[in-house]
Amino acid sequence: MIEISHLEKSYGKKKVFSDFSMEIQEGETLCLMGASGRGKTTLFRMLLGLEKPDGGSISGLKGKLCSAVFQEDRLLMEFTVRENLLAVCASQKQRKRVPELLEALGLGECLHQKVSQLSGGMMRRVAIARALLPACDVLILDEPFQGLDENTRKKTADLMKKETAGKTLIVATHNEEDAILLEGRIVQI
C-alpha cells in the first residue's frame, strides 16, 4: 500500500497541498481528477521522487519499480519508434514484445519511422508503449489519453488494463470517461 500522510507542498506563496492524506492499495487503479493546478502532476512528481514534499510523507514505494507517462511525451524525437522503445528494454523478452505492443496500439507500421514524423496521438501511444515495456510494480500516468480519438482511447485503455493486471495504476485525468474506461476508483483532488 502507498500511504500519503499530511502532505505539504508550496511553490512560493502558492500552496498546492496542505495536510493531504490518502491511501492507494496495492494492485489498485486510482484515477485522480481535478481542475488544472490542483496538484495532480506535482503529486506524481513526488511519488516518482522527482520533487520533495515540504512536509508530510509518502511511504510504500521503497523497493517498488515505477514507470510513468508524463504530460509531455518525452520521446527522443530524432530516433525511430523502435529505438525509443528499445531504450527502456532490459531483457530480450521485453525487446521481443516491441512489435507486438506497437501492433496492439495500432502502430505496427511505424516501427522504423522517426518519432518526429508521427502525429501527436501516435507519439502519445509510443510514450504509453514505452511505459508498459519495463518491469514495474507501479505505473503513473499523467493524462495518458490526451490527443487520442474515442476509438483509440478505448483500445489503449483495454490494452493498459490487460498489461497492468495486478499492478498499481495511478492516473491523472480531466475526463471521467477515461476513468470509466480504466475501471478505476475516482478521487477528486
Image (cartoon, rainbow, N blue to C red):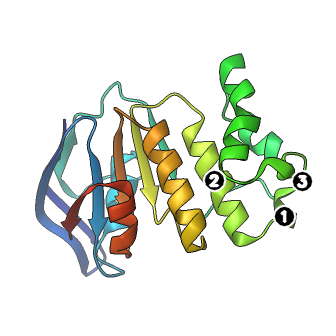
Indicate which disc residue 100 carries.
Answer: none
Label 3 to label 1, Cα distance in Å? 8 Å
Residue 114, percent across and down?
88, 55
Q: In this picture, is 174 found above or below 20?
A: below
Residue 113, percent across and down?
89, 53
Q: Which residue is mark 3?
A: 113
Label 2 to label 1, Cα distance in Å? 13 Å
Q: Check disc 3 and give the amino acid type.
A: Gln
Kind of element beneath mark 2: helix
Instruction: Find residue 174 and report its image quarter.
Output: bottom left
Crowding at dot 3, Cα within 10 Å, few <14 / some 14-19 / many 20+, comes out as some
Kind of element beneath mark 3: loop
Q: In this picture, is 27 found above or below 150?
A: above
Q: Which residue is mark 2?
A: 127
Quadrant of the drawing holding the C terminus: bottom left
Q: Check disc 1 and give the amino acid type.
A: Ser
Q: Check disc 2 and give the amino acid type.
A: Ala
Q: Which residue is mark 1?
A: 116
Quadrant of the drawing holding the N terminus: top left
Q: Residue at x 67, y 19 (%)?
A: 93
Q: Which badge, 3 or 2, comes first in the chain's sequence?
A: 3
Instruction: Find residue 19 and report its image quarter.
Output: bottom left
Q: Residue at x 29, y 70 (%)?
A: 33
Q: Nearer the viewer, residue 38 or 142?
A: 142
